[in-house]
Amino acid sequence: MPLLLPPLSRRRLLVASAALAGATVPGCRAETRRHLERAAAPTPTRLLLLSDPHAAADAAATSRGGAVIAERVAATVAAAAAEHDRRPFELAVVDGDCALDTGEPGDYERLASLLAPLRERGLPVWLTLGNHDHRDRMEAAFADPRPQTGPAGRRVARVETDNAVLLLLDSLIETDRTPGELGPAQLAWLEAELAATPAGRPALVFLHHPPLPPEPGVEPWGLLDDAELAEVLRHRPAATALVHGHTHAWSRRLFAGVPLIGLPSMAYPFDAIEAVGFVAAEAGAGGVAFTLHAPGHAADGASERIG
């Protein structure tokens, strides 16, 4: 399963327990107690969506644009924590590239420190893997005791919330190799999980690498098996949206008829015109709304509603 950082606060320990109970792997399906008790909950579920922190052991490490990464990530976390204090989130997802380049142990120690304000507020934080992460070192750094039982050794999870299902995928092929891939076993898992999702219940699929159109003369840097993913989505239309990182840019487009939501980096953009920040997702009976939070940027407050 993707790594779960439990809350550091006791006041929402029940939420963390529910999130862990709601994560499933093949042969083990469970729904959270809160979902069973509050299946018709009128209050929308709020999710904090983060991506690409690229945390570095060196607190003074800078991005290619010269920004101090730890300072940028800390500012994004502070803004997210302030939004949580205003209107609480149920959980957070960091959608890959948790580490700077090659997923060193110190990178993950730095990330844990930077994410502490969220966990201190009682938020469970799920971490998926990107191309700059190292599967074994990441697992060791966060001392995740759960067995690795995902398809073909990948870390996947089904997380149930009151108003939505989160399906967390693992597109890491090899550390510090740019493109990603899901593979047949993981795609079969995804198809089965979508088939098991009740009609009308939003299903959000998370993966680090997005399907990207090929560029002439440029080595592929997105999802290599995007055609196979498209086939799964065409046969299982339960997916409400695909959510990805990797591009360091807030974006909205369609893939195989499914809305594709790109998350901004927590740390730095590839293009100076792009935002740095986080996305708040709100799932309820009317669908799912994604809203960009990028203080000081022209696109701050931009929103995409699905359903």
Image (cartoon, rainbow, N blue to C red):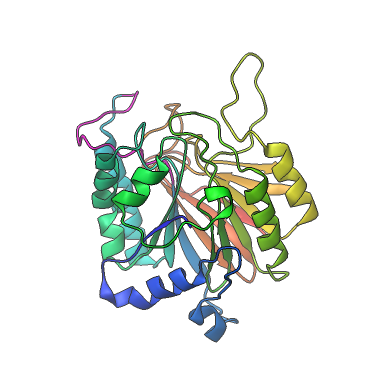
Q: Residue at x 55, y 39 (%)?
A: 209
Looking at the image, can residue 295 be seen? no
Looking at the image, can residue 106 be seen? yes
The answer to whether residue 190 is magenta is no
Left or right? Give the position of 57 relative to 258: left
Residue 232 higher or lower than 23, as above or below: above
Left or right? Give the position of 116 relative to 281: left
The answer to whether residue 57 is magenta is yes
> How far from the left and from the top, in percent, is residue 151?
58, 53
> How far from the left and from the top, in percent, is residue 171?
55, 42
Q: Specify the farthest residue to the top.
A: 217
Q: Residue at x 72, y 60 (%)?
A: 238
Q: Residue at x 56, y 61 (%)?
A: 166
Q: Which residues are magenta?
A: 51-65
If the image is split into quadrants, where does the C terminus sit?
Answer: bottom right
Number of labelled discs?
0
> How far from the left and from the top, in percent, is residue 137?
34, 44
Left or right? Give the position of 7 relative to 190: left
Q: Nearer the viewer, residue 68 or 119?
A: 119
Q: Specify the farthest residue to the right.
A: 235
> How far from the left and from the top, in percent, is residue 305?
62, 56
